[in-house]
Image: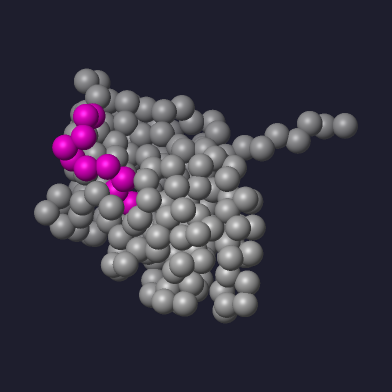
């Protein structure tokens, strides 16, 4: 009987770092990711009681911290991010707390993976891949936005500020089918600072438009 192994979309990839810590990328395996649909006015107290984190009060922002957070995606749509393998308990607590209210809780952990992009040059790397304004004056710690990165749709969350040791840290949530493509593009975006280029696992050929 064959052994069943749980693998992330980027299980063949190892974290990469540019010389001197200019930038680094790594997959964050098995983070819990839940889509929550609820009227924020009706469900805010129940959500905070279930997760320990309040719903974001402002559009395109996040509440909580790097371990447990809620990301604003739309007027009645949020993503609940939990520590590794914490999604089952979080989903059960939300379902219990929101019983009687019109809502939806869906586990999307196997559909999306998270790539962390961090370091003093992380922001410049992202600028090469998207038309989203990620300049520090427009996008700062705690902000969230969905956009197109190269040819992939993804969600970007800035977790820590530029003033933190080691530079800012971002999390890019991308569909698993586009994960390796995005990994290779991020490595290419960091090549300027010495990050090693990566070869797509499928053998595709492409180049980063400049």
Asked if residue 4 is positioned above or below residue 96 in the image, the reply reads above
- Name the spot of residue 167 as percent of width and height, x first: 21, 34
Q: Is residue 147 visible?
A: no
> Which of 85 and 93 lies nearest the eye of the viewer?
93
Asked if residue 127 is positioned above or below residue 184 in the image, the reply reads below
Identify which residue is drawn at 62% across, 77% down: 100
Q: Quadrant of the N terminus?
A: top right
Identify which residue is drawn at 42% across, 73% down: 40
Residue 165 painted magenta: yes
Identify which residue is drawn at 35% across, 55% down: 63
Q: How is the image coloured?
A: one colour
Name, please, the residue furthest toward the top: 20
Residue 120: quadrant of the picture: top left
> Which of 166 and 178 lies nearest the eye of the viewer?
166
Relative to 167, 40 lies left or right: right
Of helix, strand and loop, which mostly describes the magenta segment?
loop
> Which of 168 and 125 lies nearest the eye of the viewer?
168
Asked if residue 196 is positioned above or below residue 151 in the image, the reply reads above
Please provide the residue range marked out in magenta. 157-166
- Name the spot of residue 73 as percent of width and height, x first: 39, 66
Q: Is residue 163 visible?
A: yes
Name, please, the residue furthest toward the left: 137
- Name the spot of residue 157 as percent of width and height, x first: 33, 52
Residue 71 painted magenta: no
Identify which residue is drawn at 32% across, 39% down: 117
Name, please, the residue furthest toward the right: 1
């Amino acid at each position: 009987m064959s052994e069943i192994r749980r693998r992330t979309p980027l299980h063949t990839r190892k974290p990469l770092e540019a010389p001197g810590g200019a930038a680094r990328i790594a997959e964050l395996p098995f983070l819990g990711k839940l889509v929550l649909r609820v009227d924020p006015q009706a469900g805010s107290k129940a959500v905070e009681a279930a997760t320990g984190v309040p719903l974001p009060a402002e559009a395109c922002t996040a509440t909580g911290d790097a371990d447990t957070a809620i990301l604003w995606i739309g007027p009645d749509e949020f993503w609940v991010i939990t520590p590794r393998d914490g999604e089952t308990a979080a989903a059960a607590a939300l379902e219990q707390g929101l019983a009687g209210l019109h809502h939806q809780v869906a586990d999307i952990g196997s559909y999306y993976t998270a790539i962390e992009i961090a370091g003093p040059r992380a922001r410049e790397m992202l600028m090469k891949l998207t038309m989203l304004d990620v300049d520090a004056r427009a996008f700062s710690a705690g902000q969230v936005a969905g956009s197109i990165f190269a040819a992939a749709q993804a969600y970007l969350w800035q977790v820590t500020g530029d003033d933190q040791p080691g530079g800012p840290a971002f999390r890019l949530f991308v569909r698993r089918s586009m994960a390796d493509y995005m990994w290779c593009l991020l490595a290419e975006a960091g090549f300027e600072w010495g990050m090693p280029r990566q070869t797509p696992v499928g053998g595709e050929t492409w180049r980063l438009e400049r």
